[in-house]
Amino acid sequence: MRIGDLIARCEDEAIAAETATSLGDSGLLADVTAAAAAQNVTVGEFAVMSVEHFVTHAHYTDWARMFGRVTRARDPGAAFLHHILSDAVMHGAPHLPATAAPRSF
């Protein structure tokens, strides 16, 4: 699966929310839920905002770490979202609108 496909998959709020809740990391889900509530958005909206923030602001070293994690994963989509959500709650929640201009990858 190409990275553009992973990003596109995570731009859908329903898919992002479903994936976030199925990651099996209850601690991360609790942190994401709290961060989403603090911004008065849903978990799905927070996940979409986090992906958008990562795509537009991540340093190349962050991309390298993410690629390393995703390429070793059994489920690259889940690993991609887990990495980005972990980064978002660890380094401050994104403050981007949930609706961003469409991108082509």
Image (cartoon, grey):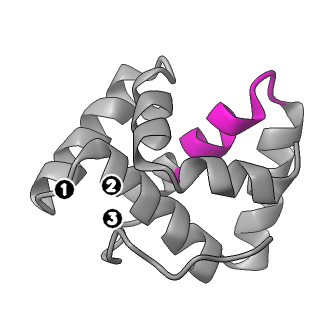
Q: CA distance from mark 1 to mark 2?
A: 6 Å
Whole-percent x and y of residue 37? 13, 50
Whole-percent x and y of residue 88? 43, 59
The answer, for residue 90, to whether it is visible in the render is no
Q: Which mark is residue 49?
A: none
Q: Which mark is residue 45?
A: 2
Question: Badge 2: few (under 14), some or many (20 or more) residues near its Cα, within 10 Å?
Answer: many
Q: Give the camera-side residue of 41 and 72.
A: 41
Residue at 22% across, 48% down: 42
Whole-percent x and y of residue 8? 66, 56
Query: Which residue is labeled 3 in the image?
Result: 93
Q: Quadrant of residue 71?
A: top right
Residue at 33% across, 55% down: 46
Q: Quadrant of residue 70?
A: top right
Residue at 67% across, 44% down: 80
Instruction: Give the mark nearer the N terminus: 3 vs 2.
Output: 2
Callout 2 secondary element: helix
> In the image, which is nearer the foreground, mark 3 or mark 1?
1
Callout 3 secondary element: loop
Q: Are the residues tagged 1 and 2 within 8 Å (C-beta)?
A: yes
Give the residues in magenta.
73-84
Q: Is residue 25 left or right of residue 56?
A: left
Question: Badge 1: few (under 14), some or many (20 or more) residues near its Cα, within 10 Å?
Answer: some
Q: Is residue 43 left or right of residue 74?
A: left
Question: Does residue 82 show up magenta in the picture?
Answer: yes
Q: Give the camera-side residue of 71 and 52.
A: 52
Query: Which residue is labeled 1 in the image?
Result: 41
Give the amino acid type for the residue marked by disc 3 in the picture. Ala
Helix, strand or loop for the magenta stretch, by majority:
helix
Callout 1 secondary element: loop
